[in-house]
Amino acid sequence: MTAGLRYTSERRELTGNVISTNPLGVKSVTATVDSGKTFNKLTWRLAAAYQITPATLVYLSYNRGFKSGAFNPTALALPAVRPEVLDAYEVGFKTSFLNRRLRFNAAGFYYDYTDVQIQRFFNGQNGVFNGDKAKIYGFEAELSGSVTPALDVNVSYQYLSAKYGTFPTAVIATPRVIGGYAISSGDATGNRTVLAPKSALSVGASYRIPAGNGSVVLAGNAYYNSGFFFEPDNVLRQPSYTLFNGSIRWNIAEEGPYITVWGRNLSNEVVAASGAIQAYPGGFGLARFAYEPPRTFGVTIGAKF
C-alpha cells in the first residue's frame, strides 16, 4: 500500500510590455502587464499492489497531479493561465513466463483533466490558454524479453479514447476559398484532444550472432501511429504513418569498442513534429509545421566498459 500527500505553493510574477513601431517610425505600447499570482494545490497518490504469485503482480492507483499556472511572456495580451489538474486512475498487472525470459504487462487507465492547458498562436505570438475539461481512457500492453538466448523481441500497443468535455471558447480555424484560414471563437466540445493517436503499435527485435571475441547484433523496429490532431478545433491533422528503423552493431569484444551502422525513417515518411495555425490581427491565419527528420543514415563508434 502507498499513500502520500504533497502541498505545493508557486509564485509567478511578470512585468513587461510590447512596443510596436508603425511605418512612420512612431512607437506605441500595445500590451503591458505588471502582475503576480500564487498557485496553491494539494495533490496525492493512493496505490495498492498484490503479488499473486512470484511471477504475477496486480496493482491499482489513484493519483492527483497539477501543472502550475503561468503568465504568457510572449503574448502579453493573453490572461494568466490557470493550473491544470489531472485525476489519473490505473489498474493493471505485470507477469513473466518461460522461466522469466518473457514479460507481459498490461494496464487500463482513465485520465480526467480540468482547466487543461493548450498552446495557440495569438496575433503572431505563441501562447497558452485554458480549455475546460478533457477525458482520456484506454489501455496499453507490452510483451518483451528473450525468445532464445540470441533473439530479443519487444511488442507494445496502446489504444486511446481522448475527447474534450465542455469547451465553448476554443479557437476555431475555418479554411478560406482564397487560401489561409478564418480565425474565430467557437465550440470544440467533443473534439479529439491534441497529439492523441487512437492507436499506436511498436514491434522490434534484435538478433545476436557470435563473431570472434565479440558479436554482431542485427536490430530493427517498426512503429505505427494512427494519426492525431495538432489543435482542439481538429483542423490540422497528421495522417497515419509507419516508421522503420534498423541497425547493425559490431561488438569487437563484449567489453570494449563497438561500431554501429544505423538508419532511421527508412521509408522516408513525411511526419510533422508540430503544427499550428498562426493567427494574425484581423482574424486571418496561416498553417505552419515543423517536421521530423527524413530518411537518415549514420555511424556510431563507442566503447563499453
Image (cartoon, rainbow, N blue to C red):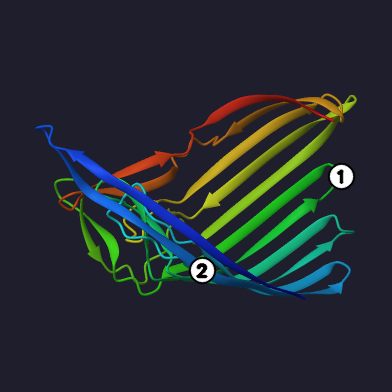
On screen, residue 211 versus residue 262, left or right, reads right
Which residue corresponds to the image point at 72% horizontal and 63% vertical from the top-left? 105
Residue 75 position, x and y percent, is: 31, 50
Q: Secondary structure at mark 2?
A: strand
Q: Which residue is mark 2?
A: 40
Residue 30 position, x and y percent, is: 20, 48
Q: Give, as a three-letter code, the residue at label 2.
A: Asn
On screen, residue 45 versus residue 173, left or right, reads right
Query: Of tags 1 and 2, which is closer to the observer?
Result: 2
Q: Give, as a three-letter code, the residue at label 1.
A: Pro
Q: Nearer the viewer, residue 7 or 4?
A: 7
Which residue corresponds to the image point at 45% horizontal and 51% vertical from the top-left? 240
Q: Residues within 10 Å of mark 2 (few under 14, many from 20)?
A: some
Q: Nearer the viewer, residue 72 or 9?
A: 9
Q: Which residue is mark 1?
A: 149
> On residue 13, which mark appears?
none
Quadrant of image for the N terminus: bottom right
Q: Is residue 16 above or below residue 250?
A: below
